Image: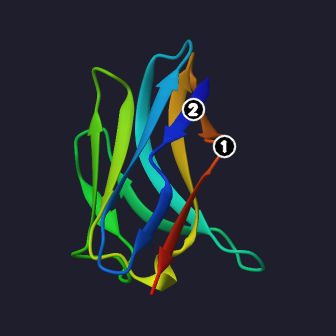
Amino acid sequence: VQLVESGGGLVQSGGSLRLSCAASGSFFGINVMRWYRQVPGKQRELVAAISRGGSTNYDDSVEGRFTISRDNTQNTVALQMNSLKPEDTAVYYCNVEVTIGVHDYLYWGQGTQVTVTS
């Protein structure tokens, strides 16, 4: 399973970015899709998650500003980030749980840098 992320970059405070992640490979289906972020010296933290049925949850720090969505026909997940703040600066990773055979596996994207300037 391969995950390819895109959409990171440099933006001013208050701006917007949209991250995308596409999954490819041989698997039966994708269960939960998530976005994490990590800054140097800190643990990777969960930003948002979306179930196969579309149920979502968000970290309190991004609630109301970020929106996670997915396209089950394309095996993609996106993170629309609005009203960005300097503290949102991090490397963002997509994470998917896929079913292969009778087992579930977790895969990570390569990460994409998001930098928000004040």
Q: Residue at x 47, y 83 (%)?
A: 86
Q: Please give left or right for residue 90 compared with residue 43 in the image.
A: left
Residue at 57% x, 32% y is: 3
Disc 1 element: loop
Pinpoint residue 18: horizontal percent, then vertical percent. 34, 52
Q: Amino acid at mark 2?
A: Leu
For the residues labelled 2 and 1, say whether their Cβ atoms are less than 8 Å apart: yes
For disc 1, the marked residue is 110
Residue 93 screen position, x and y as percent: 57, 53
Label 2: few (<14), some or many (≥20) within 10 Å?
many
Q: CA distance from mark 2 to mark 1?
A: 7 Å
Task: Note whether 109 is above or below 50 in the view shown.
Answer: above
- Residue 35 in the figure: left or right of residue 44: left
Residue carrying label 2: 3
**At x 48% / y 80%, what residue is drawn?**
117
At 56% from the left and 21% from the top, the residue drawn is 102
Q: Which image quadrant for residue 77?
A: top left
Q: Amino acid at mark 1?
A: Gln
Residue 11: image tag: none
Of residues 81 and 9, the one nearer the viewer is 9
The location of residue 107, given as percent across then percent down, is 62, 38
Q: Position of residue 69 (x, y in %)?
A: 27, 47
Categorize mark 1 by other alpha carbons within 10 Å: few (<14), some (14-19), many (20+). some
Q: Which numbered disc, 2 or 1, marks the residue that appears first in the sequence? A: 2
> Is 44 placed above or below 76 here?
below
Disc 2, SS:
strand
Split into 4 quadrants, where in the image is the C terminus? Answer: bottom left
Residue 84 vs residue 12, the one in the foreground: 12
Is 81 situated left or right of 33 in this image? Answer: left
